[in-house]
Image (cartoon, rainbow, N blue to C red):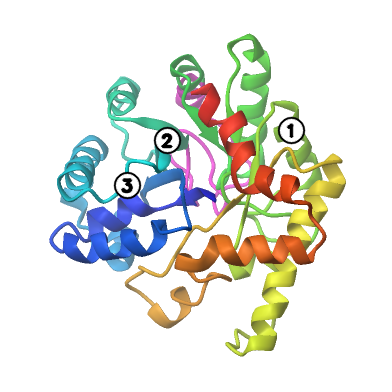
Amino acid sequence: MYDLHYDLLTYILMNKNNLSKVKKHCEEIFKNNIRGGIFNLFYMSPKEMKEELNIDFEDIEIINNLKQVIKAINKYKLIPSNVKYIFGIEGLDYLKDLEDLDEIYKLGVRSVNIVWNNDNKFGGGARGDEKQGLTELGEKLVKKLVELNIAIDLSHSNEKTFYDIIHICNKLKEKKPIVFASHSNCKAICDVNRNLSDEQILEIKKLNGVIGVVEIKKFCKILSENRKDEQETKKYRLAYAQHINYIRDLLGDVENISVSTDDMSYYKIEPDYFQNANIFRQKEVKKGIKKLLLNEGYSKKEINSILYKNFENKILRNL
């Protein structure tokens, strides 16, 4: 499967002094499992970067961080040659100026989330001011991203920023902007600010984008407890399938559906929570989702579209 949102680059950066650990992790997740996708560096506030990732503020610099990660990937052969992937940046808070986009493009970045959960100099995040859309600088940023043919990931944008981005991309349709939501589910089923309304899902389809349905428990169904027994696991898996079914029924087919993990097992804080945040174990996620979709009555062709072809056709092929 292709994972539309996997923070592998951040995992490498966090463990730059213990890359043997990273190599073992990569061997597990790539073996007959994740065969590519979007591998991200993600950025939060300096306080969160320190608490959650053990990364100090003075070490936060997008271009240098990317170079460090690329060097580690090449030196330790962390990603097999048959894995198809692009680099992504989740949260552009630390982008110094728009000219830096040219440099990160040269380093292989083909996807960005303009904002993370909080507002930044470009626009409003999912936990920020709901009235804050794209800033003037954010509008210039979106236009430059379209010019560079960098895909714009709408996950984490608040609704105002989401629609501001869509508006600009609609005006620039002749340039074939790439927009998608890498790790968001359906607000109609699970009403959290990181999920998408029906109208947002339809807007993504109009621009030929995809929705990476994410297998994070709290975005699938809000339950009263986080029990670990088999019955509870089954409930979460069925809840995950419900989001895929809902988008298929809303759009009429599976051609705009992909999947993502947003694996959280490496977080430093609250390890018991984050190590159990995902529905599927990372090293077995493809097998789990495929079995789930077969049980839901999806054809092999539809499953192939969801796990592989839609990402290839609507994102990879257009970059």
Q: Which residue is mark 1?
A: 205
Q: Callout 3: 10 Å neighbours few (<14), some, many (20+)?
A: some
User: Does the stretch in magenta take in 82?
Assistant: no
Pointers 1 and 3 in contact (CB under 8 A)?
A: no
User: Does the stretch in magenta take in 116?
Assistant: yes
- Placement of 282 over or under 109, stated as above or below: below
Q: Secondary structure at mark 2?
A: loop
Q: Is residue 170 visible?
A: yes
Q: Callout 1: 10 Å neighbours few (<14), some, many (20+)?
A: some
Q: Which residue is mark 2?
A: 121
Looking at the image, which is closer to me, 98 or 272? 272
* Labels 1 and 3: the sequence-earlier one: 3
User: Label 1, label 3: how many angstroms apart (C-alpha)?
Assistant: 32 Å
Which residues fall within the magenta stretch? 114-142
Q: Quadrant of residue 155?
A: top right
Q: Say whether residue 311 is left or right of residue 111.
A: right
Q: Secondary structure at mark 3?
A: loop
